[in-house]
Image: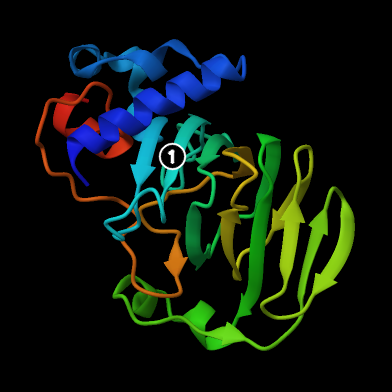
Amino acid sequence: MKRSEINRIIRNAMQFTQSRSLALPPFAYWDADEWRRVGEDSRELVDNMLGWDVTDFGSGNFEKTGLTVFTFRNGNFYRKDRYPKPYAEKLLLVGDGQILPYHYHWSKMEDIINRGGGDLALTLYNCTDADFADAEGGRSGKPGEFADTPVEVTVDGCRMTVSAGGQVILRPGQSITLMPGQYHMWQGIPGTGSVMLFEVSACNDDNVDNRFYRAGKRIPEIEEDEAPEHLIFKDYTKYSSL
């Protein structure tokens, strides 16, 4: 992705949240120089990947396949002694018609909540036992496997079962709980508008806990065609001395 595209996407996300009267914390607006000055008292932001995250999943077409994320809080897989928080909270912005490709998580259980805007269509499969066990295959880009079994989820606390490849529609105010090993793909239903989702989940590390059905890059390579206006979490090690 080009840095100019990431800058534009984050500017648009800020405008969207303001239009929805959703206040973001001050660090959402920090520029690169402010991140360079981050001290030990703000180490949690860097260590736990709080802040902006923009990805096109390697598609080269963010408007069609992509996601904008702001992480408010997160624990840490590897440093539970220092960061014992067992949960995470994220804002997920989905454009009208935009797709999140099929994937699941080995560790993370998550609630996806439609907080307003358009409708969201989720298509669901279970993974196979062999797929779930093959963590190394998933990271190497080996294709995943769908199981031909019913998928059990809860929507607003009510249990429901959908057939393999079945859909659940989340309208504003509705939520779904997704378990580890459940492949999910979603799309903002075209014509209903952009969707403002929240994710409440177990703590997670997006560098290692995403299994894509087809090879896809969760963390984008960035072409630095202009200076960053705001950083995404991938940038922190470059700009912060922590």
Pick whichever, 164 or 179, lies toward us. 164
Q: Residue furthest left?
A: 225
Q: Position of residue 17 (x, y in %)?
A: 53, 22
Please tell me whether residue 215 is drawn above or below residue 206 in the rendered image.
below
Q: Going by the picture, which residue comes out furthest to the front?
A: 191
As drawn, is 112 to the left or to the right of 138? right
* Closer-to-camera residue (200/91): 91
In the image, is 98 to the left or to the right of 33? right
Q: How many dots with numbers?
A: 1
The residue to which callout 1 is attached is 68
Is residue 45 in view? no
Q: Is residue 73 above or below residue 134?
A: above
- Residue shown at 12% from the left, 44% from the top: 223
Q: Amino acid at mark 1?
A: Thr
Residue 94 point in image, percent of width and height: 52, 43
Q: Position of residue 82 (x, y in %)?
A: 45, 32
SS for callout 1 = strand
Q: Pinpoint residue 14: horizontal percent, then vertical percent.
A: 44, 21
Q: How many residues crowd mark 1 within 10 Å: few (<14), some (14–19), many (20+)?
A: some
User: Is 227 placed left or right of 94 in the picture?
Assistant: left
Q: Residue at x 23, y 21 (%)?
A: 229
Q: Which residue is pictured at 52% across the width and 87% down the height? A: 130
The residue positioned 35% from the left and 53% from the top of the image is 207
Q: Which quarter of the image is occupied by the C terminus?
A: top left
The residue lying toward the viewer, choosing from 125 and 206, is: 125
Is residue 139 shown to the viewer in this render? yes
Q: Quadrant of residue 172?
A: top right
Residue at the far right in the pictured view: 158
